[in-house]
Image (cartoon, rainbow, N blue to C red):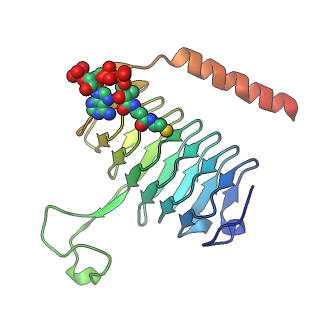
Amino acid sequence: MTGNNIFFDLAELKSLGHDSIVGRTVRIRKPKLCSVGHHTILDDFTYVSCGITVGDYTHIGANGVLIGGEAHITIGHFVNIAPGCRLIAASNDFSGGGLVGPTIPPEFAARSIISKITLEDHALLGTNTVILPGVHVPEGVSTGAMTLLTADMKLEPWTLYVGSPARPLRKRDSSQILATAARLRAAEKSKG
Ligand SMILES: CC(C)(COP(=O)(O)OP(=O)(O)OC[C@H]1O[C@@H](n2cnc3c(N)ncnc32)[C@H](O)[C@@H]1OP(=O)(O)O)[C@@H](O)C(=O)NCCC(=O)NCCS
């Protein structure tokens, strides 16, 4: 655990692992609902308005936005989220009737779409990737810069996706990545 934060006391987090950094300007609105693993970094100017669980050796780059109302966002181990990505687990319905936004009283507001987002281990998000409510990102999925993922997509593990909407570009080779992660875990364990 390192450093102070200008918005909240890091001790309010549900948990914060060892050797992890939450940048001074990271804004977490509900710290009691947020767990951060070991050897993990949440970089500056990231904004988090919902509960999150973040694994070990994971990086959320600068200017990340994680929004979810009552929904939870779960991010696994060895995940790398490049700067400027937006994970949106809650939204008003932009296609229906009703007024939209946090300034609108509930009885006048469009229906809400609230659905958890999960990123499995070894997911990599290219810069400015956007993930909408209900997306499940399987193990080892990576995205190119400016990719859009929506809940109706059936994403395959260890596949690189690009574009808006996303299309599969090629498979990723998992064997070396998983072996290297296992060696890192073993080295960590032997250090005690
Ligand atoms: C996706 C990516 C890895 C592909 O790199 P590459 O293997 O060199 O791919 P190429 O440049 O050969 O392009 C292959 C095809 O994918 C398309 N493509 C590549 N990147 C794309 C992107 N971000 N969005 C949409 N299409 C993309 C190309 O137009 C090309 O299409 P075509 O086959 O129809 O001509 C790379 O372009 C990318 O976006 N990297 C993310 C970088 C990043 O955000 N890093 C974060 C640093 S912290």
Decide if residue 138 is in sight here. Answer: yes
Q: How many numbered dots are placed on residues in this image?
A: 0
- Determine whether, in the image, residue 8 is placed left or right of residue 114: right
Residue 8 placement: quadrant: bottom right
For ligand 1, the image quadrant comes to top left
Residue 29 on image: x %, y %? 53, 70
- Determine whether, in the image, residue 192 is placed left or right of residue 115: right
Task: Identify the residue shown where x is 25% and y is 41%.
Answer: 152
Q: Is the N terminus in the top left, top right, bottom left or bottom right quadrant?
A: bottom right
Residue 18 on image: x %, y %? 76, 49
Task: Identify the residue shown where x is 64% and y is 52%.
Answer: 36
Residue 144 on image: x %, y %? 36, 33
Decide if residue 125 is in sight here. Answer: no
Residue 142 placement: quadrant: top left
Observer-nearest of 24 and 143: 24
Task: Identify the residue shown where x is 38% and y is 56%.
Answer: 89
